[in-house]
Image (tube, rainbow, N blue to C red):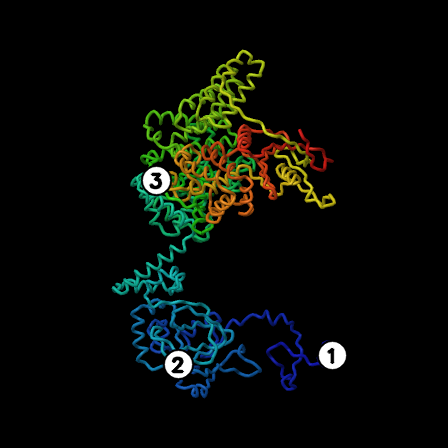
């Protein structure tokens, strides 16, 4: 069938060769060779030299032309010299003779043998003639750096200016690629790869190549490798990686260039060269600072911000400052690695598992630089078996366990670690005295071999930088994970600020008081904060025995510290600065110790601790109400000492530092005891206690279909029919919270607008109407760094005392202001401060400025003034307990404040006080109780009480 097809219709062959019969007939026959063979054919191992025609290995064609080809004119150089002599230009011709004109080149014909690789149509191909004159320089890479020195360039320039213009041509094949060096005016790397030779355009004196011939129209030749050269001197190569980013000429030399670079390094630089080198170094430093990653820039910002303050700098001695100077003297890569490790937990890490590609692909040398100045510990310092075992992953631990025949230790990592630790503690029958240490030493040695190179931050320098970060973020509370991670959140906050994605309010930083007297005082505060965090973490994890040990140790330390050191300076500080002292931190530990003792049912010890805490009034005064309430509970419920419980309630109700909810809690406890049959004989004493009067508010109850969620725990969820049509039919049902169910109920009552914001609704209005007073100037020490979201005295009585006149004036203004004035005041602050971070403001609470303006128009100035006055006097205890919902009707400007209570939920003491206070201010307040119906319950139903 193939033959018949070829006879009927001639087909063109894909082969490059033609058969003799085809040549005569003028047609091509079909081939039986598959077409895939045409594309998968291997290139020949040997190629013909385009100058002499000699067959040479394909990968050595360039070496042959440079060193061995007889038709290659090397000028004054020889093949043995390897092209190390100076030559301004090399003129090439196929016959090895210099051609003076294109006509002469066209007439010359060399008879050389060529391989079948160049044959086509059974004709012998001669080397391609070059129809134009081209200046081509072949530079040996081994001497490239020496050829680029100032001395050579100067000499070469003189030669090129006095010599006649020369042109040469180099013929190449379509399968060959050669490196041709052309120096342009801008000294940039250029690389092009085409089939034809490259023309060399007219060059300037700076490139040291001159040509008077017009450029050839031939295509440019492609080079395998590109190189960039600078005429400023060999020292520029050391800064190549920095200059490349800043627009300067960079060097892309091969590794062989380093051998000849040393020949120029011994020569002294002139004054002009030194000046240029200094300018280049300045440019390098500028480019380097701009290219630093955010974490290193922010870390440097923290160091500068703390150490530029005289009071903070005095808290570090010479040894501490040497650690800071040591960090500043590190290379950029070493600084990057140290900050990265500083942000991680303090533990041993395997170097081969550190993946910081943006720093360096091989971190071993960078880690070695840190270890040399004492910033890192290496595997030589790893002596603890537990730390070594914790460093290994589970597969390597399993292999280590098998080495010591511990196959039954389990497969989990902790089980393997426990088995190896038990083995290290076992005593041998033959040598019981020293076997324990020997077995542990052997296991440690094997574990270190499996771990390989490992590092850990040295505790000394890390403690210095931790104290610097603690001073910088003194006003922020850090948890265990944050403190262990080297204040990563603080560094991230600086990043957001520098990038413009986070803005803090405008205020003046004014520091007058010294929180820490000396370095030892700062170290003691840091230790107390770490002890507090350790106790808190143990309590959160339910490890009450460990928490008890930590609490007992901290209590012992505090007793010794209080007896051996003068802490009177802490009492002289304002209460909002006193919270950053050692005594405050240990007092918080003792307060948590009460909870630990109660959890372990050691009520007598808990009572003793509470009585000791209540004897002092210097630290944690805002916790006194909780202490009194807990003391009365322990006496009454657990120790059955009713008379002492009554005394505790009397003292608590008379304490001026007991506020709002805690005072009401003590009063309600006295009422319950008075009605209890077991306390009949104490009723006279209970009646004599100070009373706290509050008025009840309106209560309503609605019903909704309860969503049966799994487990039955947590907040109740309800099924709510989605927006209904006029026909009363619901198209879908959504799962909602009890507050959303209540909002739907009040929407049916005509309140077209509503917000579920709890206390954030009122705190946002409080901040927007009091913005300038909250961040006013002239109050010392309330703003101590530029990254605060509120003044330090906000949660203390000092807030009102420091701004008494301004607050009274603003409250009076609000009470007398019209609706237009209130809306204008709100708009001014909203438009100028929107988006800035303030702990009081939730910018997303209102959908728009207009919604907030409509709400304050409904609330009125008198009501807003009363709420703001109460919050300003005691924001610490008044920030909680506000109603859940604020609903209003935009048509008649009516509103309602609603506290929502789901099934089995009841009002707290703070909520009762706020509801009573809001009702006294004239607000329409009510409590909405939501009860659950069965699975077939459908619509909301209001039950009036």
Question: Disc 1 to disc 2, how far (Cα)?
Answer: 58 Å
Residue 911 screen position, x and y as percent: 55, 30
**In the image, what residue occupies the spot 74% across and 76% down?**
1
- Depth check, mark 3 against mark 2: the one in front is 3
- Mark 3 vs mark 2: which is more N-terminal? 2
Residue 361 horizontal/vertical position (percent): 45, 53
Left or right: residue 833 versus residue 718 is left
Determine the residue positioned at 36% across, 62% down.
237
Left or right for 310, reference 19: left
Could you tell me which secondary element the residue under label 3 belongs to?
Answer: loop
Between circles 1 and 3, the one closer to the viewer is: 3
Q: x%, y% of residue 9?
A: 71, 81
For disc 3, the neighbor class at 10 Å (few under 14, some 14 to 19, many from 20) is some
Q: Which mark is residue 634?
A: none
- Asked whether the beta carbons under mark 1 and mark 3 sit within 8 Å of each other, the answer is no
* Picture disc at residue 511: 3
Residue topped by disc 1? 4
Q: Which one is earlier in the sequence, the residue at label 1 or at label 3?
A: 1
Mark nearer the N terminus (1 vs 2) = 1
Q: Which residue is mark 2?
A: 167
Tell me the element at label 1.
helix
Give neighbour class at mark 2: few <14, some 14-19, many 20+ (Cα, 10 Å): many
Count of residue discs: 3
Q: Is residue 448 visible?
A: no
- The CA distance from mark 3 to mark 2 is 77 Å
Q: CA distance from mark 1 to mark 3?
A: 103 Å
| 381 vs 53, nearest the viewer | 381
- Numbered disc 2: secondary structure: loop
Q: Position of residue 427 (x, y in %)?
A: 46, 28
Q: Residues within 10 Å of mark 1 (few under 14, many from 20)?
A: few
Q: Quadrant of the C terminus?
A: top right
Cβ–Cβ below 8 Å for labels 3 and 2? no
């Amino acid at each position: 069938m193939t033959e018949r097809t070829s006879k009927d219709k001639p087909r063109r062959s894909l082969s490059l060769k033609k058969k003799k019969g085809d040549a005569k007939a003028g047609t091509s026959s079909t081939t039986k060779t598959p077409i895939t063979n045409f594309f998968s054919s291997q290139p020949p191992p040997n190629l013909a030299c385009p100058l002499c025609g000699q067959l040479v290995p394909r990968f050595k064609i360039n070496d042959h032309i440079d060193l061995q080809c007889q038709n290659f004119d090397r000028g004054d150089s020889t093949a043995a010299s390897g092209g190390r002599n100076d030559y301004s230009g090399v003129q090439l011709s196929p016959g090895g003779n210099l051609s003076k004109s294109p006509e002469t080149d066209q007439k010359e014909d060399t008879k050389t043998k060529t391989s079948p690789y160049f044959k086509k149509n059974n004709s012998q191909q001669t080397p391609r003639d070059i129809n134009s004159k081209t200046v081509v320089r072949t530079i040996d890479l081994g001497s490239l750096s020496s050829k680029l020195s100032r001395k050579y360039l100067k000499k070469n320039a003189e030669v090129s200016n006095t010599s006649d213009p020369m042109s040469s041509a180099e013929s190449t094949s379509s399968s060959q690629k050669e490196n041709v060096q052309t120096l342009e005016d801008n000294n940039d790397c250029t690389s092009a790869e085409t089939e034809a030779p490259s023309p060399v355009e007219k060059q300037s004196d700076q490139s040291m190549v001159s040509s008077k011939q017009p450029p050839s129209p031939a295509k440019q030749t492609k080079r395998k490798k590109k190189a960039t050269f600078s005429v400023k001197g060999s020292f520029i190569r050391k800064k190549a990686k920095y200059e490349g980013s800043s627009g300067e000429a960079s060097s892309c030399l091969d590794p062989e260039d380093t051998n000849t670079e040393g020949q120029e390094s011994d020569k002294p630089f002139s004054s002009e060269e030194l000046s240029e080198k200094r300018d280049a170094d300045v440019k390098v430093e500028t480019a380097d600072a701009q290219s630093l990653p955010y974490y290193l820039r922010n870390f440097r910002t923290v160091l500068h911000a703390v150490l530029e303050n005289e009071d903070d700098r005095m808290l570090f001695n010479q040894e501490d400052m040497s650690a800071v100077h040591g960090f500043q003297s590190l290379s950029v890569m070493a600084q990057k690695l140290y900050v990265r490790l500083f942000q991680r937990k303090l533990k041993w890490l395997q170097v081969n598992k550190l993946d910081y590609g943006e720093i360096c692909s091989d971190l071993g040398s960078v880690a070695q630089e840190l270890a040399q100045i004492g910033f890192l510990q290496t595997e030589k310092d790893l002596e603890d078996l537990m730390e070594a075992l914790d460093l290994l992953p589970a597969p390597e631990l399993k292999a280590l366990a098998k080495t010591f025949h511990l196959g039954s230790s389990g497969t989990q990592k902790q089980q393997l670690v426990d088995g190896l630790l038990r083995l290290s503690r076992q005593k041998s029958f033959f040598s019981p005295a020293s076997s324990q240490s020997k077995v542990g030493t052997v296991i440690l040695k094997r574990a270190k071999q499996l771990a390989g190179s490992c590092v850990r931050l040295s505790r000394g320098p890390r403690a210095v930088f931790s104290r610097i970060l603690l001073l910088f973020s003194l006003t922020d509370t850090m948890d265990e994970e944050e403190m262990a991670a080297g204040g990563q959140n603080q560094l991230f906050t600086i990043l957001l600020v520098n990038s413009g994605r986070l803005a803090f309010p405008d205020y003046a930083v004014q520091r007058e008081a010294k929180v820490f007297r000396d370095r030892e005082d700062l170290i003691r505060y840091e230790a107390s904060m770490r002890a507090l965090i350790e106790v808190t973490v143990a309590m959160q994890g339910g490890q009450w025995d460990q928490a008890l040990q930590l609490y007992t140790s901290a209590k012992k330390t505090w007793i010794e510290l209080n007896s051996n050191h003068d802490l009177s300076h802490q009492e002289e500080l304002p209460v909002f600065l006193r919270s950053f002292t050692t005594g405050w931190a240990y007092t918080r530990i003792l307060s948590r110790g009460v909870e630990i003792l109660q959890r372990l049912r050691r009520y007598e010890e808990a009572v003793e601790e509470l009585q000791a805490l209540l004897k002092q009034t210097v630290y944690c005064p805002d916790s006194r109400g909780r202490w009194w309430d807990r003391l009365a509970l322990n006496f009454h419920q657990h120790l059955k000492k009713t008379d002492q419980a009554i005394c505790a309630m009397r003292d608590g109700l008379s304490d001026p530092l007991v506020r709002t909810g805690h005072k009401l809690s003590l009063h309600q406890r006295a009422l319950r005891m008075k009605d209890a049959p077991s306390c009949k004989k104490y009723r006279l004493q209970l009646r004599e206690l100070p009373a706290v009067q509050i008025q009840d508010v309106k209560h309503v109850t609605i019903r909704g279909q309860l969503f049966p969620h799994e487990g039955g725990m947590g907040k109740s969820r309800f099924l709510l029919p989605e927006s209904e049509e006029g026909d009363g039919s619901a198209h879908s049902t959504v799962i909602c919270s009890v507050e959303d169910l209540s909002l739907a109920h009040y929407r049916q009552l005509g309140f077209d607008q509503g917000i579920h914001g709890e206390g954030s609704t009122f705190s946002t209005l409080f901040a927007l109407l009091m913005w300038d007073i909250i961040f006013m100037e002239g109050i010392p020490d309330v703003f101590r760094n530029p990254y605060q979201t509120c003044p330090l005295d906000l949660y203390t009585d000092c807030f009102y005392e420091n701004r008494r006149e301004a607050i009274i004036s603003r409250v009076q203004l609000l009470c007398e202001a019209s609706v237009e004035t209130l809306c204008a005041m709100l708009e001014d602050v909203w438009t100028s401060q929107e988006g800035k971070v303030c702990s009081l403001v939730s910018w997303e609470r209102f959908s728009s400025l207009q919604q907030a303006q409509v709400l304050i128009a409904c609330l009125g100035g008198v009501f807003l003034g009363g709420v703001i006055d109460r919050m300003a006097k005691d924001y610490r205890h008044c920030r909680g307990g506000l109603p859940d919902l604020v609903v209003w009707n935009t048509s008649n400007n009516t509103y309602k404040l609603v506290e929502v209570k789901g099934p089995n939920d009841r009002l707290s003491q703070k909520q009762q006080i706020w509801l009573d206070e809001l009702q006294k201010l004239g607000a329409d307040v009510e409590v909405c109780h939501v009860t659950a119906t069965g699975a077939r319950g459908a619509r909301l139903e209001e039950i009036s009480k």
